[in-house]
Structure formats: structure tokens, C-alpha cells
Amino acid sequence: MIGFISSIFLLVLFIYLTLYYYRQIQTKPSITGTEEQQVSVTQPLPKYYQMQPGESLWDVAQKEYGNPYLYPTLVELNQLSSPDLVEPGMKIRIR
């Protein structure tokens, strides 16, 4: 008889705790699609490189990016019409 009563007690306790936990989950505030979220994105500061005599964008891409085939990135970033237009002493943006 005592085993039966303790089994009933444990069952009722289990149901109570389950319902309590379920209500806690349901009442927590959640982010819905109607609320606006503001995300702030900061751009890294630009980094510049001064061209040295005898250097090309190929060389700079190798030094800065580790891959010389990325020299078109430097052309685009600096809005150059041709990669051959760089001169010694010229400052180019690399980031």
C-alpha cells in the first residue's frame, strides 16, 4: 500500500513539474518578426601602402594578402583604370 501511494505521489509530482516548466517556457518574452532589431556594423579603418621603386600591384598583393592573384582587388579598391598606373611613392589602399 505504501508503494502504491508513493507511486501516485511521484506521478502527480512529475505532472505538476512538467506543467510548471511548460508554463515558464510559454510566458518568456520572445523576439518576433514584428519587432525591429538594430544592427550596427562598423567598417575597419582603411590601411594604406606606399609603393616602392620596382614594385607592382602583383608584389603588393603577395605581401599583403599572401596571394599575388588578388591584385585585381587592389585595382578595384583604388579605382585604377589599369594596374600599370602605379608609381613609386604612390599611396594605395589595401584594406
Image (spheres, rainbow, N blue to C red):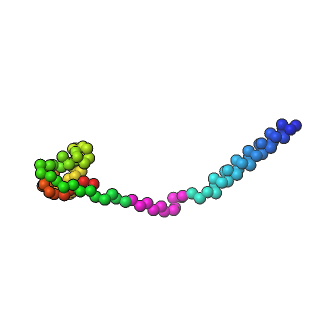
Q: Looking at the image, which is closer to me, 41 or 31?
A: 41
- Residue 66 visible in rendering: yes
Residue 77 can be seen in this image: no
Residue 2, quarter of the rendered image:
top right
Q: Is residue 34 magenta?
A: yes
Residue 43 image point, x, y percent: 34, 59
Task: Please state the extent of the stretch shown in magenta in the rendering.
Answer: 31-41
Furthest-right residue in this view: 1
Depth order, front residue of 2/45: 45
Question: Residue 92 occupies which quadrant of the picture?
Answer: bottom left
Q: In the rendered view of the protein, which quadrant contains the N terminus?
A: top right
Instruction: Identify the residue shown where x is 64% and y is 57%.
Output: 27
Residue at point 21%, 55% (across, down): 49
Residue 48 lies left or right of residue 18; in this view the side is left
Q: Position of residue 46 (x, y in %)?
A: 28, 58
Magenta stretch, main secondary structure class: loop
Left/right of residue 82 with respect to residue 44 in the rendered view? left
Residue 2 magenta-highlighted: no
| x then y, percent, for residue 66 | 25, 44
Instruction: Identify the residue at horizontal 25%, vertical 48% (top origin).
Output: 64
**Could you tell me which residue is drawn at 16 percent across and 57 percent down?**
90
Query: Is 44 placed left or right of 89 in the picture?
Result: right
Q: Position of residue 8 (x, y in %)?
A: 81, 42
Image quadrant in which the C terminus is located: bottom left
